[in-house]
Image (spheres, rainbow, N blue to C red):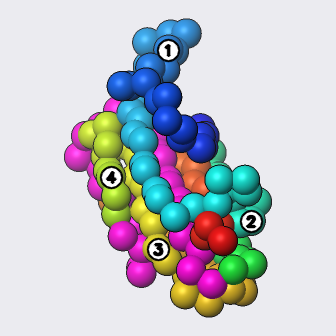
Amino acid sequence: MYAYYHVAGAGEPAGYTWALSTSVANSGGIARYSGVSNTSPLDTPAVNASSSAGVTSLSVPGVTTTRPGAMLIGAAAINSSVTTIFITGPSGMSERWDLGGKRQEYDDEVQPSAGAGGARTWTFSSGRAAVAWLAALRPAP
């Protein structure tokens, strides 16, 4: 799983394209946020977790935000082409998408106060190799 961020400007194209070097099961999405700092969009470095073994849940350590109102963002992906496996996001986070036959889920949540946040856990309806990440967006001044 790869995650990128981009600070949008006035001259944005109508769409974006990613090219893969080989044909593989894949999915992707773009999330748009307003009210985020243009100069330092990430409030904290991203943290991640992964397992090459088949797991039914994956926890990512919490992040420590520096400003109240930071937007926690995170995603999990499983190694599967089976469309009947479901990913459930962490408690308290809102699902923004669940794409690619249930192979990837993206979630977010406002953290009202600055400070340490707890770990976030994604669960899977069947054991699979998985990866997940968590970061925080810094509110604009």
Badge 3 marks a residue whose secondary structure is strand
Please tell me in which quadrant of the rendered image residue 36 appears.
Answer: bottom right
Mark 4 nearby-residue class (10 Å; few <14, some 14–19, many ≥20) = some
Q: Position of residue 46 (x, y in %)?
A: 70, 58
Residue drawn where x is 32% and y is 50% of the image: 98
- Residue occupied by mark 1: 19
The disc, 1 or 2, on the residue closer to the chain's N-terminal end is 1
Q: CA distance from mark 2 to mark 4?
A: 23 Å
Task: Decide: few, some or many residues near mark 3? Use Cα within 10 Å; few <14, some 14-19, many ≥20.
Answer: some
- Mark 2 packing: few (<14 Cα in 10 Å), some, or many (20+)? some
Q: How much space separates mark 1 and mark 3, taking CA atoms?
A: 30 Å
Query: Reading the chain from its start, which is encountered first: label 3 or label 2?
Result: 2
Of labels 1 and 2, the one closer to you: 2
Whether label 2 touches label 4, CB < 8 Å? no
Describe residue 4's horizontal placement relative to residue 121 as left or right.
right
Residue 82 x, y percent position in the rendering: 30, 37
Q: Residue at x 38, y 25 (%)?
A: 15
Assess disc 1: are there few (<14), some (14-19) or many (≥20) residues with their C-alpha within 10 Å of its C-alpha: few
Q: Tell how many labels.
A: 4
Residue where numbered disc 2 is placed: 44
Q: Earlier in the sequence, mark 2 or mark 4?
A: 2
Q: Amino acid at mark 1?
A: Ala
First-in-chain label (3 vs 4): 4
Residue occupying the point 45% across, 66% down:
108
Distance from the alpha carbon under mark 1 to that under mark 2: 29 Å
